[in-house]
Image (spheres, rainbow, N blue to C red):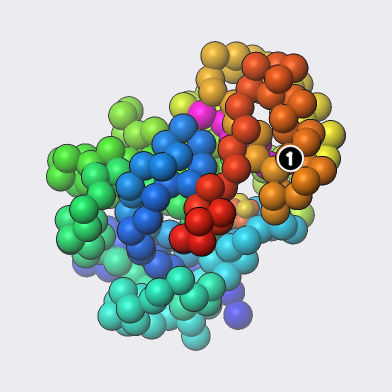
Amino acid sequence: MQRDLQPVTVNSIAYPVNETFESLQGEGSFTGTPAVFIRLQGCDVGCPWCDTKHTWRRDIDAMVSMEVINAKTGEAVETWTWFDLQSVARIVGSTRARHVVITGGEPCQFDLRPLIALLEAQGCRVQVETSGTYAPQVSPTTFLTVSPKWHMPGGRAVLDAALSRADEFKVPVGRQADIDRARDRLAPFDGVALWLQPLSQSPTATALCIEAAQRYGWRVSLQTHKFISIR
Ligand code: SF4
């Protein structure tokens, strides 16, 4: 049973969190950077190859306590709960990382500015990973990774408001058409780093990415965390 996908206010601003964990950023411009990840619950984009399908729905039945969320160790399960700003800041402050990645799900469903302001005041750099299907509500200094999801079953359009704010693009590639579409749609944003990411580390997709990177001067992102078996 899916319920309200809007953020709510529970005496203060709160966000639905699936998990938090400390690791290394495995993709894109910050590959190898120690980071703390905040994974928000909820996504209506519907990518068939999504590897976080457990974050799509926000079922009331899957709502648990903050302690249960904090005790997670990488299980891909639908449990989630509301975290207020201070709870997120406390978790981030308890880690060694000063790079915070807000991911999902689709984090740009929410106004992230209050959370980012608090984290930046704590001395953190914040990166947000989005599909580009919501207008990003982030601080001017947020590093925005846009992984455009065109023509997905959820029917959401990729917005110019997201593309024009991107600090980097990360394009999932399964076939040549994905590369051709990125070349056509992202041409107006020349100068923004464009990473091609082969889906599921498929050898065929990887070969396509390498060829296109060499042809167009783009880059290849390899989800390095999966090669060293970390989250
Ligand atoms: S936008 Fe991200 S979280 Fe949502 S379905 Fe696509 S890959 Fe999964």
Q: Is residue 60 left or right of residue 212?
A: left
Image position, residue 173 (x, y; %): 73, 40
**Which quadrant would residue 13 be assigned to in this image?**
bottom left
The quarter in which the N terminus is drawn is bottom right
Residue at the spot 33% in from the left edge and 58% down from the top edge: 22
Residue that sits furthest to the front in the current view: 228
Does the magenta portion include 84?
Answer: no
Residue that sits furthest to the bottom in the current view: 61
Does the magenta stretch mainly form a helix, a strand or a loop? strand
- Residue at mark 1: 206
Residue at the spot 57% in from the left edge and 70% down from the top edge: 54
Residue type, mark 1 in image: Thr
| Number of on-image labels | 1
Image position, residue 92 (x, y; %): 23, 56
Q: Is residue 208 left or right of residue 142?
A: right
Q: Is 114 in front, or is 34?
A: 34
Image position, residue 31 (x, y; %): 45, 39
Q: Is residue 32 visible?
A: yes
Q: Classify the position of ligand 1 by quadrant: top left, top right, bottom left or bottom right.
A: bottom right
Image position, residue 95 (x, y; %): 22, 58
Residue at the spot 38% in from the left edge and 82% down from the top edge: 64
Task: Say few, some or many: other residues with alpha carbon within 10 Å of mark 1 (under 14 / 14 to 19 / 20 or more).
Answer: many
Secondary structure under the numbered disc 1 in the rendered image: helix
Residue at the spot 15% in from the left edge and 45% down from the top edge: 122
Q: Is 138 in front, or is 141?
A: 141
Magenta segment, which residues?
Answer: 168-173
